[in-house]
């Protein structure tokens, strides 16, 4: 019941849906697996790994938050915003390296 309420809140307060979260999480898990299996070194590779790890961790935290919210509404909103900020920042940083 709480999970459904969390997804309803998410859909009402953002452009995300449960399907978006599930699909994006699955994609990021697959991409993360592919990246960690590549053995490259150097400062640029370390930055890519760092930003991708941050993004992966934030998506994982967001997924856990939404699928198993065990906090107050204000803590939920704060955690949600924190995850989204990390994801957006990491994505922007990755774009600088990959474009």
Image (cartoon, rainbow, N blue to C red):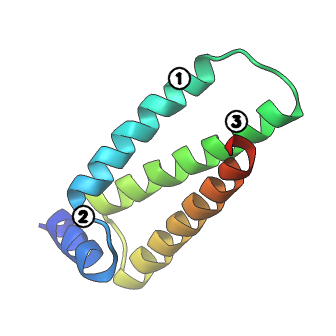
Residue at figure coordinates x 53%, y 54% from the top left: 58
Q: Indicate whether 6 appears above or below 45.
A: below
Residue on which disc 2 sits: 17
Nearer to us in this view, 7 or 95 = 95
Coordinates of residue 37 in the picture (x, y in percent): 59, 17
Number of the label disc, if any, that sits on residue 59: none
Quadrant of the image occupied by residue 41: top right
What is the secondary structure assignment of the residue under circle 2?
Answer: loop
- Quarter where residue 45 is shown: top right
On residue 49, the disc is 3
Question: Residue 81: x and y, percent?
Answer: 50, 74
Q: Which of marks 2 and 1 is nearer the N terminus?
A: 2
Q: Of label 1 and label 3, which has the lower sequence position?
A: 1
Q: Residue at x 58, y 68 (%)?
A: 85
Q: Give the side of residue 59 with respect to residue 45, left or right.
A: left
| Residue depicted at x 24% and y 64% | 17
Q: Which residue is drawn at 39% across and 38% down?
A: 27
């Amino acid at each position: 019941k709480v999970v459904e309420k969390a997804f309803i809140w998410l859909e009402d307060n953002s452009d995300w849906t449960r399907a978006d979260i599930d699909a994006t999480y699955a994609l990021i898990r697959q991409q993360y697996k592919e990246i960690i299996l590549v053995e490259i070194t150097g400062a640029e590779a370390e930055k890519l790994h760092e930003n991708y790890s941050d993004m992966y961790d934030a998506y994982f935290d967001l997924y856990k938050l939404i699928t198993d919210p065990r906090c107050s509404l204000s803590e939920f909103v704060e955690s949600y915003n924190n995850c989204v900020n990390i994801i957006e920042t990491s994505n922007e940083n990755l774009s600088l390296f990959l474009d």
